[in-house]
Image (cartoon, helix red, strand yellow):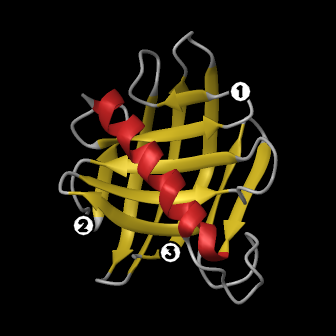
């Protein structure tokens, strides 16, 4: 079930991000006060501006995004999907009950998910209002063939659309 939700969320997020209006920084992933950052297998992934945001995608899916600019070849879309709108607290991203940590590598078409066998993760929401959400996360995400990506030092402070 979580795999289906992740794929639906992925498709919706790609449409929403690609249809978003340009920010004051000229439409790139820089600028603005919203930030989403983490380390993926030792490499920095830092997003700010229009590609860092959160939103309720469906009645049972809430997502927090940090997508690279889609005009870049092979961009990464990193996102956390939750099975309900979160409140301040801690969440297990290794079970499909709470949600999942995800990485889509568009260059390879691979989806890595913390709910796949061998995955795990955690999320802590430290602040939440009707318009902003802030927290920290880490997860190990696995693709369909068992390859793993380790996400560490994750943090976000984004608007809720």
User: Is 73 situated left or right of 16 in this image?
Assistant: right
Residue 137 makes an appearance in the image: no
The disc, 1 or 2, on the residue closer to the chain's N-terminal end is 2
* Disc 2: which residue: 87
Of marks 2 and 3, the one in the foreground: 3
Q: Please provide percent x and percent y for residue 43.
A: 80, 44
Q: Please provide percent x and percent y for residue 131.
A: 36, 84
Of marks 1 and 2, the one in the foreground: 1
Q: Measuring 66% from the left and 80% from the top, which residue is drawn there? A: 22
Tag 1 and tag 3, C-beta contact below 8 Å: no
Mark 1 residue element: loop
Tag 1 and tag 2, C-beta contact below 8 Å: no
The circle on residue 108 is: 1
Q: Measuring 24% from the left and 48% from the top, which residue is drawn there? A: 83
Mark 2 residue element: loop
* Disc 3: which residue: 158
Q: Split into 4 quadrants, where in the image is the C terminus?
A: bottom left
The circle on residue 91 is: none
The disc, 1 or 3, on the residue closer to the chain's N-terminal end is 1
Q: Measuring 19% from the left and 51% from the top, which residue is drawn there? A: 60
Q: Residues within 10 Å of mark 3 (few under 14, many from 20)?
A: many
User: Is 48 situated left or right of 90 in this image?
Assistant: right
Residue 39, above or below 130: above
Q: Residues within 10 Å of mark 1 (few under 14, many from 20)?
A: few
Mark 3 residue element: strand
Q: CA distance from mark 1 to mark 3?
A: 28 Å
Q: CA distance from mark 1 to mark 2?
A: 34 Å
Q: Please provide percent x and percent y for residue 35.
A: 62, 72
């Amino acid at each position: 079930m979580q795999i289906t939700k992740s794929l639906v969320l992925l498709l919706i997020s790609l449409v929403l991000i690609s249809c978003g209006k340009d920010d004051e920084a000229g439409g790139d992933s820089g600028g603005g006060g919203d930030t989403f950052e983490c380390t993926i297998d030792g490499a920095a992934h830092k997003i700010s501006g229009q590609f860092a945001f959160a939103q309720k995608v469906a009645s049972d899916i809430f997502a927090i995004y940090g997508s690279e600019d889609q005009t870049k070849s092979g961009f990464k879309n990193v996102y956390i999907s939750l099975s309900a709108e979160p409140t301040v607290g801690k969440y297990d991203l290794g079970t499909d009950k709470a949600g999942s940590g995800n990485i889509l590598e568009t260059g390879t078409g691979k989806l890595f998910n913390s709910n796949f066998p061998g995955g795990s993760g955690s999320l802590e929401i430290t602040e939440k209002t009707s318009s902003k959400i802030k927290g920290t996360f880490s997860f190990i995400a696995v693709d369909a063939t068992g390859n793993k990506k380790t996400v560490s030092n994750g943090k976000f402070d984004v608007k809720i659309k």
